[in-house]
Amino acid sequence: AMHVVKPARRLSHDGRPSGWGNTSDIEDVPADLRVVSLLPSATEIIGALGIRERLVGCTHECDACPDEWGMQAALAAGVRRVTSSAIDPHVTTQRDIDAAVNEHAATAAKREVDAARGATAAASGNDEGDPPLYSVDNELVAELKPTVILTQSLCKVCAVSEDDLKGAAASCGLHSDAPATLTEVGASIENIAAACGVPQRGKRARERFEAQLAEVAGAVAGARSSGKCGVRPSVLLLEWLDPVFDGGHWVPGMMRVAGCEPSLNSKEGSRSSRREWSDVTAVDPDVVLVACCGFDLRRNAADAAAALAVNNGDNPFARLRAVRMGRCFVLDGNKYFARPAPALAVGAALVARCAHDGDEIVVAALESLSFYPDCAKLDDSRNLAWARVEGAGAQTTELNNLLRQMPEAGFEEPDVPDIEDFDGLHEEACARGDHFYIDPKTGYMVMTKIKHEARGRCCGSGCRHCPFAHVNVRDKARCIQVPAMLYTPVDGIASDVVILMWSGGKDSFLALRAMLKPGGALHDVGPSGVVLLTTFDATSRIVAHQEVSAKDVEKQAQHLNVGLVGVPLHRHAGTGYVSRLEAALEVVTSLGCKVKALACGDLHLEHIRSWREEAVGRGLGMKILYPVWSDVAGENYAALTKDLVASGVPCTVTAVTDEAAAAAGATVGAQFTPELSNKLQASGKDAFGEKGEFHTLARVWKVPRELALGI
């Protein structure tokens, strides 16, 4: 189970937190002040100083000024994003991100050595097509005419550094900071304010930040003095899971503020260190916090779930005492731990809340703090702060059920005309012969098909325009960005196949069983003659409407040992649904197969069938089969229900859209049974939910393959 917390939305009319006081009466803001912030933390501080209107440029990663709503207002007012990155962490695994960063670091180091030796780029083997880890649009920076540019020298991996500016700061003030402790973070707030000509605002903001830290420490210490608070728990914050890194810089200080003892890295100000799982199991801390750098709660929860599921739950992470005892928590590492900014005070409070979980006195003291996040229900939050992972028995599927209830992180940026069709951008870049283009929605640099073909291989990172069908991607369900095989049967695929549109639910499952029966399209060839085709959202990796994860569908295909092709659908892509299906067919035919027909699990809705025939059948020139269709609505439901029972496969409700269906018993987590079907029919609802009243997941792995398939 997970418990979710929502940060309080205590905002003034201009987006500043109400607890920071009125800064407008302290001093005037320099009339000519124009700030370009190359740090998400600096952008947050600019908002905290009450000078958001003087911000003219920020990074592709900035999302708080001082909060999400303030950032949204800044972008709406015309603030420009001036940076991009060669790595999009949102669609890349932690291990692949680590490998890419190491590769960039090694390349940069080699270039520095070669430059010192006077070697040319060609002599050093430099691939001029590879961009730096971070890039600054220096022309745009110059166009914005900043008087102050804020950057950092702490970590070249985490953000734009001075070296990336290439002279863009020649005509203005450049302020670079490298805070490594909480005290230095406070000083950095004042330094940024001084650089912007508002030192008194900086003084007040620092005082508020340090006062909040003191309030957290006081809340814990006050409870401890009562004699009812236990010993200081040992806490390990994992800044990265694959490979393992502990928390560094200010994190040990945050733990001590929270009344805890940091495990492994105990020296505040020291860098995060790479560890082995054996190091973690050796200290076996009381509490484990997963707050990976740059990732929000959703991503950290998903990665933690995946880490717990490795080797069917038999792994060092799952065996940790904290995990087994329900004292492992995932948090929003991006917002509350990764940035040297005022939000670290809230992070310290969250550390205390998780570490002292179960101590009612400490929890009550923390929750009484004015800046402490408010508790909220799952369906009433956009900004989620932390969640509990309940023991090694918490399976990936169960965690994903909770993740589906969490809204997507971030916020909607103002509409920018003519930039959301990245397929169009890609085609234009290829026409020019470019190796990269910048995704205007995220600011990340995207490799074109030309660049991939020049490399001659799939790099395994799940790139958006991979021309090699993601052949080297390890975790395809989580990473692929173009249609690709998610699973290929161990005994191969038949030369002639039927592609079955597969949602993972009972209807498509029953369609598969129907085709394998005598007289069915697959009876003579068997399961090797079918390839399942599933479409899912490229960001959430969830099958639309079904609330079924791509991972669950992959698990189905593996157990049934049938082919599965995945089709990620991008929200802002110009490529249509049918075009994506056509690309999926090409993936299958590239294996040497001939696609005889498409099949669907439609039951009786004529308008859906008509659309399929027109848009999909004629559009792709394919015959479409309807193995479980009835011209009379519901006429075959009894037979279908009997067949479902015969399969032994439990089908669980994963999503409900109709209140009457829910009242009849079709609630999330309920089992679809003949009894439920009868109740739905008695309530006037479609007994199979054919009109979208509810959706299911067929847990085929619960029974032997032969029984599930009816063979």
Image (tube, helix red, strand yellow):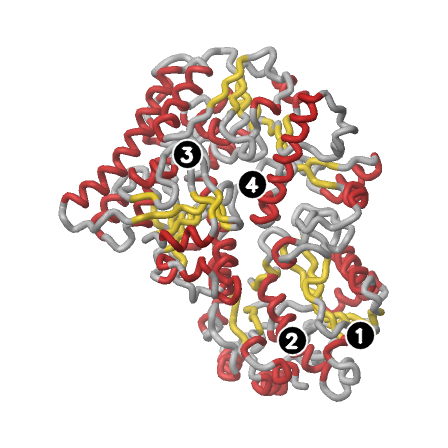
Which residue matches tag 4?
A: 412
Q: Amino acid at mark 3?
A: Ser
Image quadrant where one finds the N terminus: bottom left
- Counting labels gives 4
Q: From the viewer's perspective, is the residue at label 4 or at label 2 nearer?
A: 2
Q: From the viewer's perspective, is the residue at label 3 or at label 2 nearer?
A: 3
Using the image as rendered, state which of residue 638 and residue 375 is in the foreground: 375
Using the image as rendered, state which of residue 314 and residue 78 is in the foreground: 314
Using the image as rendered, state which of residue 368 and residue 72 is in the foreground: 368
- Residue 494: numbered disc: 1
| Residue at (28, 30) in percent of width and height | 211
| Residue at (57, 22) in percent of width and height | 162
Q: Amino acid at mark 2?
A: Leu
Residue 692 placement (x, y as % from top left): 59, 67
Residue 94 visible within the image: yes
Residue 270 placement (x, y as % from top left): 41, 34
Q: Does 431 sit left or right of 473 as displayed?
A: right
Q: Is residue 199 above or below residue 48?
A: above
Which residue matches tag 2?
A: 560
Quarter of the view holding residue 432: top right
Q: Earlier in the sequence, mark 3 or mark 2?
A: 3
Q: Are marks 4 and 2 in contact (CB under 8 Å)?
A: no
Q: Residues within 10 Å of mark 3 (few under 14, many from 20)?
A: some
Secondary structure state at the residue bearing disc 2: helix
Q: Is residue 428 above or below residue 402?
A: above
| Residue at (81, 42) in percent of width and height | 454
Which residue matches tag 3?
A: 270
**Residues under labels 4 and 3: Cα distance?**
36 Å
